[in-house]
Image (cartoon, rainbow, N blue to C red):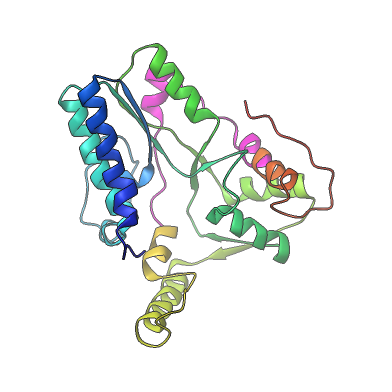
Amino acid sequence: ERDDDGSIAAVNLQGVINVLRVAQELGLTLHKAHSSGGLPCPKEGTITERTEPSDSEEEAIYAALPYLNAKKEATRHLLQAKADGLRIMISYLPSPIGPASRSDSILNGLIKGYVKTHKYYHPVGVSVAYVDARDAPKAHWVAYMNRIHDDFILSNNATHQDFIQSFESVTGIPLKSRPLQLKTVVFIGKVMDFLKRWIFRNAEFPLSEATARLMFANMAYSSAKAQRVLGFEARPVGDTFSDHFRDLISRNVIAIDREPRMPSIW
C-alpha cells in the first residue's frame, strides 16, 4: 500500500507509457494484458469495459492505493492511445491463476495456510473473479490473427464451494469453511492501521482497512464482449483450480503426501 520509492508508479504507469511511446514511434501493434485494477469498481452491478467511475466507498479506497491508482492511470493512457489511432488490444485480467504461477503470490501464501490449518477463510457473499492464465494468451492470439484492436475483460467467477471442492479432490485435505463478515474484517483492518500508525511503525501487518474493503469489493466482471468478439470461452473452474493446486504440489510449493501429477500448460 506504500510507494515510498516510486517503484509502483514506475512499473505500472511509467512502464506502460514508455511502451506506448515506442509503439507509436515505430507504428507497432500493441497487445497489453492489464490488471482488473484498471477498471472502475462500483459497489453494485456488473462491471463491463464501459463502466463509469463512481463515488462509492470502494472507489475511494481504490484511489488511496498506489498500485490500483497507477493501474487506473495506465488504463487512461492506453485508451487514449487507442482513440488516437494506435492499433492496440487490451485485456483486463481479474486474478490470473493456473500452472506456473509465482510461488510468492498472495494466493499461494494463503493456500499454504489452508494446507496447514485445514481452514478456508472467505468473504461472505463475494464470488472470486479470475482468469485461467492459459486462456489469456489464447485470446490475444485470436485478436492478433484477426487484427482485432479493442479492450476486453477476460473473467470467470468461482464460489467458495468451487475452491473447496477442487482443493479437497487434489490434495485429499478436508477444508472447513470459515466465512468472514465485512464488519468484522474492516474492524480488524482499522485496528492494524492504528497500531501501524501510532505504535508499531516499523511492523508489517497482514491487513489494513483498505485491503479489508477490497476483499469485499464487487467482483461481477462481464466477459460477454470477449465471448462475442473473440469467441472467448473460459476454462471450467474445476480445471483451473485443480491444475493450479497440482502445479504447486509438483513444484513443492506446498507439501502434500501425494504423487505429483504435472498439469498441462495448454
Measured along the vertical axis of the image, is residue 195 above or below residue 209? below
Measured along the vertical axis of the image, is residue 223 above or below residue 129? above
Quadrant assignment, res 226: top left
The answer to whether one can see residue 250 in this image is yes
Quadrant assignment, res 26: top left
Horizontal arrangement in the rendering, residue 80 relative to residue 213 (left or right): left
* Residue 112 picture location, percent across and down: 66, 59
Name the residue located 67 percent from the left edge and 38 percent from the top edge.
243
The answer to whether one can see residue 176 in this image is no
Foreground of the two, 212 or 99: 99
Q: Quadrant of the N terminus?
A: bottom left
Residue lying farthest left? Answer: 84
Quadrant assignment, res 65: bottom left
Horizontal arrangement in the rendering, residue 251 relative to residue 72 (left or right): right
Q: Does the segment drawn in magenta span residue 135?
A: no
Name the residue located 21 percent from the left edge and 51 percent from the top edge.
54
* Residue 39 picture location, percent across and down: 30, 43
Foreground of the two, 48 or 95: 95
Magenta region, residue range = 216-242
Foreground of the two, 110 or 3: 3
* Residue 164 picture location, percent across and down: 67, 51
Q: Does the segment drawn in magenta span residue 235?
A: yes
